[in-house]
């Protein structure tokens, strides 16, 4: 801790003159660069530059008060920032100040005294079996039909689908490997690490997914989109990486409308995949591994809404097992 303190005061001046912006820059370049993946490090840097430094970056670190941070949250809200964005910014600042406390640069973490932004819990809008069939029927023959089939049958995340590459797909063996995701860096798409090591996984594909991918590969070969620089499975019509905003506006939302389905998030197809698996009797451990959750408890907590129907089915099975006809 003394070494950090000496380095900070030596490079940036006396600790009493150290500004929030200067400290955050040092924190990002040292502790956080080693602690988080590159994409997360860039996200933190952008959040600090756009939201923190513009408002409280010039305040001396030792003079920073809970009121400064509370006003930061209020100003962001007035500027139209979502509760989720404010929560993330608060989390970055809290983490940075926690490290400043460990380095003896501040007497306490003043962010602990701040009323934190509250994000309303989002209730996933999952599609029923019939609605899922309607979606796939509407997508039949579409350039990205296989993407929707994979979303509903495997529960891959949007970035994982957009970043899926042909070398990771074995149609003969009937499986694919999830090893990366497509991310956006300063407006440029790039393949990036997954969020957690558990997210790296092998998925056994059902027949409908294999058949759909075969058709998709053949179409990509005919249209000249199979050989793209990143070897991506799913691209736009020019063979370039998919962009979320364009994909949602031009492809996904129109598809929902054609299928006469409610407007949902694309991520809700992941919830749909998990719900369908649990409803058909898949063990939660299997669903956990399919989704890449860190623990089976995460899967059970996330899909607790499915539990009542599963319990009813289980109770009925016990009656049949014991010959009770009541």
Image (cartoon, rainbow, N blue to C red):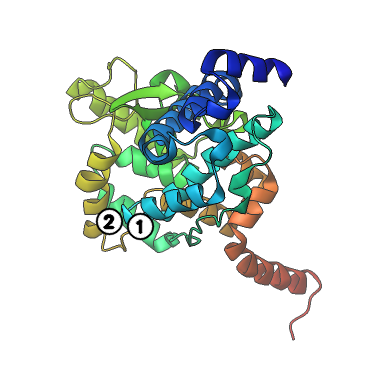
Quadrant (top left, top right, bottom left, bottom right) of the N terminus: top right
Viewer-closest of 140 and 252:
252
Please name the residue shown 57% across and 33% down the image.
199
Residue 14 spot, x, y in % from top left: 58, 21
Q: Say left or right for 301 vs 69.
A: right
Q: Nearer the viewer, mark 1 or mark 2?
A: 1
Mark yes or no: residue 72 visible: yes
Q: How much space separates mark 1 and mark 2, taking CA atoms?
A: 8 Å
Disc nearer the start of the sequence (1/2): 2
Please name the residue shown 28% across and 38% down the image.
144
Q: Say left or right for 210 vs 257.
A: right
Viewer-closest of 60 and 161:
60
What is the residue that sits farthest to the right in this orientation?
322
Q: Say left or right for 132 vs 140.
A: right
Mark 1 and 2 residues: CB-CB less than 8 Å, in contact? Answer: yes
Viewer-closest of 132 and 19:
19
Residue wearing tag 2: 256
Residue 128 spot, x, y in % from top left: 44, 62
Residue wearing tag 1: 264
* Quarter of the view holding residue 6: top right
The number of callouts visible is: 2
Q: Is residue 146 above or below residue 21?
A: below
Residue 118 spot, x, y in % from top left: 51, 59
Please name the residue shown 55% across and 25% down the image.
27
Quadrant (top left, top right, bottom left, bottom right) of the C terminus: bottom right
Q: Is residue 190 above or below residue 100?
A: above
What is the residue that sits farthest to the bottom in this orientation?
326
Tell me if mark 1 has few (under 14), some (14-19) or many (20+) residues whose alpha carbon lies within 10 angstroms of its own.
Answer: some
Mark yes or no: residue 200 visible: no
Residue 110 spot, x, y in % from top left: 61, 45
Please name the residue shown 51% across and 61% down the image.
121
Residue 317, numbered circle: none
């Amino acid at each position: 801790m003394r070494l950090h303190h000496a380095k900070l005061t030596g490079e940036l001046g006396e600790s009493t003159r150290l500004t929030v912006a200067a400290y955050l820059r040092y924190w990002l370049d040292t502790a956080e660069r080693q602690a988080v993946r590159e994409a997360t490090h860039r996200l933190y840097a952008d959040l600090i530059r756009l939201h923190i430094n513009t408002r409280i970056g010039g305040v001396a670190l030792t003079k920073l008060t809970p009121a400064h941070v509370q006003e930061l949250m209020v100003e962001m809200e007035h500027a139209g920032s979502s509760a989720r964005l404010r929560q993330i910014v608060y989390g970055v600042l809290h983490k940075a100040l926690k490290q400043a406390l460990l380095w003896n640069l501040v007497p306490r973490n003043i962010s602990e005294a701040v009323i934190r932004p509250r994000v309303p819990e989002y209730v996933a809008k999952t599609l029923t079996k019939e609605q899922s069939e309607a979606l796939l029927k509407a997508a039949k023959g579409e350039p990205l039909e296989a993407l929707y089939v994979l979303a509903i049958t495997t529960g891959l995340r949007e970035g994982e689908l957009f970043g899926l590459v042909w070398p990771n797909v074995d149609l003969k063996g009937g499986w694919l490997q999830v090893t990366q995701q497509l991310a956006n860096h300063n407006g440029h798409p790039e393949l990036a690490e997954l969020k957690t090591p558990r997210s790296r996984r092998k998925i056994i594909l059902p027949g409908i997914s294999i058949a759909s991918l075969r058709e998709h590969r053949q179409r990509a070969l005919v249209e000249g989109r199979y050989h793209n620089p990143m070897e991506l499975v799913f691209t736009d019509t020019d063979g370039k990486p998919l962009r979320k905003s364009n994909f949602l506006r031009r492809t996904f939302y129109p598809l929902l409308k054609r299928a006469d389905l409610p407007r949902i998030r694309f991520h809700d197809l992941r919830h749909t995949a998990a719900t369908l698996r649990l409803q058909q009797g898949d063990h939660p451990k299997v669903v956990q591994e399919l989704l890449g959750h860190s623990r089976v408890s995460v899967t059970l907590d996330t899909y607790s809404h499915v539990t009542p129907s599963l319990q009813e089915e289980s109770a009925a099975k016990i009656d049949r097992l014991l010959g009770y006809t009541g």
